[in-house]
Image (tube, rainbow, N blue to C red):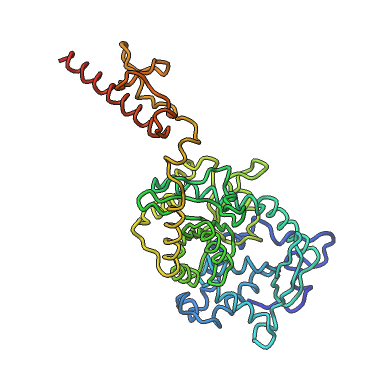
Amino acid sequence: MDIVTTEAQFASRFTGSGHERGRPRNPYNKDKCQWRPGATSEWFGAEPAIAALRPASRNQEDIRWYAYGLIMQFQVPVLRRVIEAVLVFDHGFKPKAITEALYKLEKHEYMGGRHIVCERVQLDGKVHKVYSFRRLATPAERDYLQNLCGSLNKALPNKAIGNAGEQYARGLLISSNQYCNITQKSRLGQVVDQNGENKLDLVAKDIQSGRTYGISVKNQREWIHSGHSAIKDCYNKAHAHGLLPWLIVSFADSSAIKRCERDGIRLTVLNRQIVPAEASDGRRMRNVLRELWSVIGPRPFEFLHARFDRTLKSSSATVADVAAIRSLTSSHEPSGASRASDTSLVHTAAATPNAEQLAPNMKRKRIPYLCRSPQKNGPYRKDAPLVTPPQEDGKLTSPEKRQIPRSLQDAQRIAALQSTFERSAHCQEMEAC
């Protein structure tokens, strides 16, 4: 490939002869194949010495030349996150190695760094790193990037991304049928401790083991590493509630997985970002993101519908996530620091009053449907009169006179009604015989 030496020659590739007037054509057009996921997978086929190496065995020098080739062949200023997404998802490099390679490209003492220009550009209120080959971004290119970043933030605000991740995690727990006492949808992200602090996204209890987990969901595009603040926050907030920590993230590297195993944090990596299936204007989010590939890159997404069962039917990856949640055995013993959390959880449960102590302050529960008296016409009716349970003195005494908590009195009443119902059903069977 020929190397463009002047800005005029470079501009002529997009404006035609280089003498056209008016606004240049948009180099970030959605119809250009270079912005589509997987489009760069064959760009380096002419270098068999590098292409023959596996991504895990390539050293950082090779990755630096991959990044150099991407910036040169894109032919326009590119956001740093787009280069990272291409190298990670299309070529299989590790995020940490890519960060170090791009840092080297910014240094002029390295060969190749003399050709790569890195500038900080403020786009939609945020500062982004933009890489280009042998030149700075033109004002028109900055305007295009500004408009695209503004459209992306409008289509996917941080609040919508956070809510989508929390609802997706809640749907996984419910569909697995392995957890109970799951936080209600209206309280997602608002689970606080007794002091009104340490907000968790949701709480769930394992039915088999009886352990209760404090869950934190990080539905972000960045990769979680060992020193990320999300790991420490999840650990501290869960222990403030007296619960076991559980962290659910979109992306995580091997160092984060090792640290969570060491610290006793249950980690679930989704390997994609959760977004709503519909944008705020009613358009399909899949079509909206297709128009913004030039500022997103080949990042994988999962589209969450309003009904989670519809997401299950439309996505095989979601079915695999539910199976992975279900396969987490309740006999998993956390290691290291999480064993202390088990002890604190036991102490918290022992200090909690039982149901009999709380029963006098609670409303009286309604008698179950099956405790109604049988009718002649077959099915039981909700308005049927209650069967009076037999008592020794022939009448029901008040809880104050009997000195029995209301919960025990209700239990005795229900047991008496059930025995009456069973005797009545047995008599009917005998008559039928």
Q: Is residue 68 above or below residue 240?
A: below
Count the numbered circles shown: 0
Q: Which quadrant of the view contains residue 378?
A: top left
> Camera-side residue: 418 or 65?
418
Q: Quadrant of the C terminus?
A: top left
Taking the image as drawn, is residue 281 in sight? Answer: yes
Q: Is residue 21 above or below residue 159?
A: below
Q: Is residue 325 above or below residue 380?
A: below
Residue at x-position 40% and y-position 26% = 367
Query: Seen from this angle, which residue lies furthest top?
Result: 376
Residue at x-position 44% and y-position 27% = 366
Taking the image as drawn, is residue 286 in sight? Answer: no
Q: Quadrant of the N terminus?
A: bottom right
Q: Residue 149's spot in the image, x, y percent?
A: 71, 58
> Camera-side residue: 58 or 9?
58
Q: Residue 14's spot in the image, x, y percent?
A: 73, 64
Query: Seen from this angle, which residue lies furthest right?
Result: 21
Q: Residue 363's spot in the image, x, y percent?
A: 49, 31
Q: Residue 180's spot in the image, x, y percent?
A: 43, 45
> Camera-side residue: 354 or 255?
354
Q: Which quadrant of the view contains residue 394?
A: top left
Query: Seen from this angle, which residue lies furthest bottom?
Result: 109
Q: Is residue 236 above or below residue 59?
A: above
Residue at x-position 31% and y-position 25% = 416
Q: Which quadrant of the view contains residue 73?
A: bottom right
